[in-house]
Image: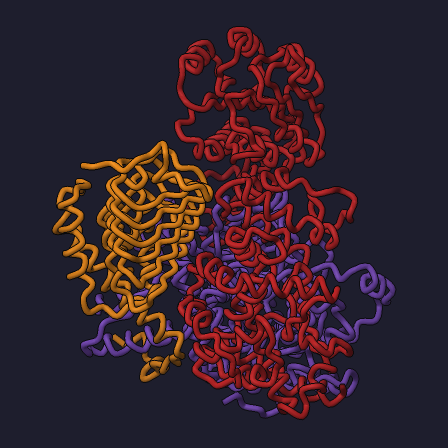
Chain colours: A purple, B red, C orange
Amino acid sequence: MACKNGYQRKVRDVYRFISENLYFNRPDIEVKGERYNSALLFGILTAIYGGKELIIGEPGLGKTTSAEYVGCLIYRYPLGTIWGSEVSGHPEQTEEKIVGRPHLGELNRGNEVVVWSNFVQIPVKIVDEINRLPETKQSMILDGVDRGNWEYLNEILINDEYVLFATANYQDKGTNTIIAPLVDRFDVLVESRHPGPNIALQIGRRSRLENPLRHPDFERRFHEVLRTQMPYEEKVSRLEELCDLFGEYLKEELGVEGLKKEERQEIRRELARVPVDLDANAFLRMVLAEFSFCHRFGQKRSVEQCAEGCHYTGYICYHVRNCASNRLPTSVIGYSQALAWFLEDDEVDIEHIRTVLPFALAHRVQWRDSYISKKEGEGRNDPLQIYLAKEATEEIFQRYNEQRDYLLEALSVAYQAFEGEEVTPLDGDHPLYEEIKKDIGSK
Amino acid sequence: MKEIEEILKEIWPKARKKHLFPQLPMPQVVEGGEEVALEMKSKQLQISASFLEGMKGLISLEEALEAVLDHGISHYMYCPWDFHTHLTLYSEAKKALKDKRLAQKATSYFMDVVANTYCVKERETKLPELYRRLPKEGVQEILASLYQKIWGIDLGVEGDHSERVRRLARIPYLEKRLWGESIKKFAKVIEDLLEEEIKAEQGQDKKVPNPLGEHSLDNYSLEEIDRGLRSFASTVEDVQEFKETIEDLKEELSERGYAIGGMGRGEGNPIDADLLYYMKLAENYTLPIRKLPLEKSGDLHPYSHSPWEVGKPFHDIDPWTSFGKIMPGLTQTWVRREGEIYGEIESTPDCLIIIDSSGSMTNPRERLSYAVLGAACACNAYLKNEARVAVYNFSDAFRGNKLLLEFSREREAIYRAICRYFGGGTALDLEDIAYLLKQADQPDIFIITDMQITNLEKLIEFFSGIENRVTAVHLGHNVHTARFREGLKKKRNISLFLVREKEDIPKIVLGKIEEYWSSSL
Amino acid sequence: MRNPFEEFKGQATKRREIPLDQILRSKEETLSQILRGYENLLKNEAKDLVWLMQYSTVIKAYTIAEEGIKGIDYTAEDIEEFCYALDKTDQIPYLITGPAGVYISALCNHAKEDEITLRLQDLNVKINLLGYRLPEGKRLIVEGNVGDFTGIGLDGGELIVEGSAKNYTGAGMKRGRIVVKNNVGFNTGHGMTGGEIVVGGRIKGLGKIVGGKIYERDHLIFPSEEMKPFFF
């Protein structure tokens, strides 16, 4: 049962405020009869879930600004503080600029004291153009965000909450790619699109000087706290006090409340409690089966080519080169729960999964050239990665729709078989039936 | 009408949930159309208020609306699902009935039966209640009788149609893989009734309405039509089947604004079914070409930092990021990388396609010609990389059986040139080839032939003297292919493909392109 | 290890059955029984996938076929389904058109219906020996083309072929009527002793006919001045 305790209203207010006043763009996805802009919606979901979002897009289309606004309002940090904490991607970035540096005075006295960067101290972490960072630095950031631990010179800083927004331009000359093991660690991939000429003009006409989320006075006070050498735990409570004050300012001046830390933590607990209905559960299993199964080699492996003439050439497993990681279901379920909570739905259903899945899948799949060739010429509004993921989602959904009852029965029988009852697992053409048999047999 | 809209707002979320959330916009309620409850245009369901008002005394508005929505959503979610399925069903029905209008009607009714039966079996639906109240004449009466039998629900049909219905009831409507066979059986059983219906329509000069909506190209967007044609081209047995279906639908496609080059070009270009076939089929085999990367400059320059370790050289230490200290864990050293510069910029070469259309080659307009298909795939690959393509289509060139198309990016013109079939003798005019080669800067050559060329020796001599990259594909193995291979085996710029089965052509041609460009990078 | 299917405990949905499911199931069952009978016939009569077309082998095959179909409750549509099943090698181990035709003839002769229509236009293979011993009171209509030995030994029934037939049509027929809308091949009516063969198209050649009548395009061509009965 979704907790309807007013938090959803607050978060939806944040969405509404940003879309009406700050980040102007067209709605491009529809869920439960309502239309949303995917970049902003997933930004909000990432912020409340505490995930890692990769935002792509052409230069100057609001990739970083959307993340900044979301981080600012959900976490109640002034925009200037957010700016000051961003890591920008260029090859010369060092660990000292990203994580922390030695205190120079203490260093000359022979003491190891770390001055932590703002980036690691505040929960909102934004990396601009992450693909321009060398791989070692990308890995360092992702490790830190995954674990919440930052280490430098024998000292450790532990974040108890964090969210990562990383932006990347499309691959062009002079940039690194984000290698597969690293890109897999992002929960979702979204595109910040061009808003169209009419909205773009509105953006162009706005004054650069008026940004309601800036507050020099608060920014100074935040900076003072961040630069002190007090223990981090104490610093966190001081920062929260400032966040509360800034939150009151936001409420008075802009009519939008951010979220307190306790509220965010409570929301995360609520998200985790949102149940997943059977259809969503079964559909997701079907998806995972198609992205990991290989009849010939046991599982998909990027170093092993699919065989021609395999029985399963009609399934997605034939069109992909790599195997879906275990982070995929984590991301899908987590974001689906966040979406269901956001929409005040009682449980995660198949529509939530279908909405979230393409964005969780797009950056994780390596498609075969033949599949890309077939699809890349088709008319679309999404970048190719996301489009292919959406197409695959719909294709699998059609299969699910056709055999839903039978599949649910098969899973029910599988439960019995796994418990040791004398039942025969149901047969079917889909890879999931084979996987069920393996699970039962391997017990 | 307002009342209906209110009820719709309430029912629509429930209907969506019931059908697992189809990606359809909120249906619209429209005036007019008393005899037809539902229309579907590019995923937009339009429900007739007049029809529902007309049903008021017989069935509640909620039930009628729910039933209509179930019907419309089932068409979207199950049968036909997409335009490709619709085309396939139509094509099979046409094989059985041999008449376009009969086949269209049979397809429409078949899809209704499948969608309705799916709904009744898999979902809670009010469709039987609606059908009980609908007028039952002609084919509708038979179908209602059929529904009675296969759903096990009384729909108030009284006539004796036991013989016909018995046969219809044996058809496995919910077995998707058997739909092709099923529609043929279905069509044959009701053929005479469909003929009567068409006669009646001609007499009254008015279509007999299907109460729950017609099925036509209007149900699909242009993108869906394009995609459906592409899938259909790859699944039909031969070009004739595709051609026949397209010829039947030519008018409707033109009215929809679908032109051979793609969508949105208006009604100007008449559709050539053969061209469309190869175009759509080749789209299934297109090859991605890697963009050319930058050249390496050969110079190393500082790129990024990494921690300095004891034992590493000093000369790359960056003192500015090391806080003036040389100590492990603090000091940073530069990692150098080779720069990338624009050297000699290579672009994708243009391509001259030389295709043999002599009598020994398959006529592409009669049967699937893998030579034409291979050429079409190659054409697509080059055009996609913004290269130009020229075509030299030859039979007995010296007698005028040849076609020269100069380098261009006009897809339709190139396809027309490739698909042209002369069917005469086999002789190349090398001057034509030399002329075309001069029109571009060192273009690639793709030649597709069975090598039974009268002046083969001259061709070998010609290829020996050029440096253009040549991919030669020949069908079968004969003394001429052996001679060709022997004559050019020392030329590194020439790749030969022996094709034992015609099905190998698309794969090999495309693979070799990749190899070529990979090797040149 | 935790049961990975825990959420689906007790969730086996009772799948709704409609009469269509029962009809299809019954159809499949009947077809299986018919196929078993056919396989049994092949096992006995065509061990090496070779079947010699001879008077005695046909009789023997027919007897075995009759045994094979005893107790099966089938309709004319089931016979038609069986004919199409013969076309698909994934359903039938192998097709030998002679025994298949005899088997189908047995099915037709013992069918409940007096009039049977087999719509075989889409069949790739042309079945031989259709209409073998068709008894009086039975009417067999075949839409499509048929093979050799069609209607041989016809025993009073009416066989209508809305297509063409090949050689030995009506050979050895005793009584009854064969109508072929299009053409027939050689040795038409060979050994027939009675009954009528009516051909709407061309007859490539007549056999050695003992009795009965043969019409070609509404003209009586046997018996005629040019064609007299043959005595074996």
Residue drawn 22% across the image and 66% down it? A442
Q: Is residue B52 above or below residue C55?
A: below
Quadrant where the image shows the N terminus of chain C:
bottom left
Front residue of B183/C61: it is C61
Q: Is residue B480 visible?
A: yes
Residue B323 on image: x %, y %: 57, 53
**In the displayed structure image, the side of residue B466 where residue C77 appears, left or right:** left
Q: At 18% from the left edge and 77% from the top edge, which residue is drawn?
A: A422
Q: Quadrant of the C terminus of chain C?
A: top left
* Residue A245 sits above or below residue B259 on the image: below
The structure residue drawn at horizontal position 27% and vertical position 50%, both measured from the top left corner, is C101
Residues B301 and B422: in front is B422
**Image quadrant where residue A191 sits:** bottom right
Q: Nearer the viewer, residue A146 or A34?
A: A34
Q: Residue A121, how many percent across, how many down?
A: 57, 71
Whole-percent x, y for residue B188 in the image:
49, 60
Pick the front one: C99 or B484: C99
Q: Residue furthest front?
A: C225
Residue at image point 33% right, 34% down: C227
Place of residue B441 in the rendered image (x, y in percent of width and height, measured from the top left): 68, 20
Q: How many marks can you see? A: 0
Q: Quadrant of residue B208?
A: bottom right
Task: Report the side of C129 relative to A62 (left or right).
Answer: left
Q: Is residue A39 visible?
A: no
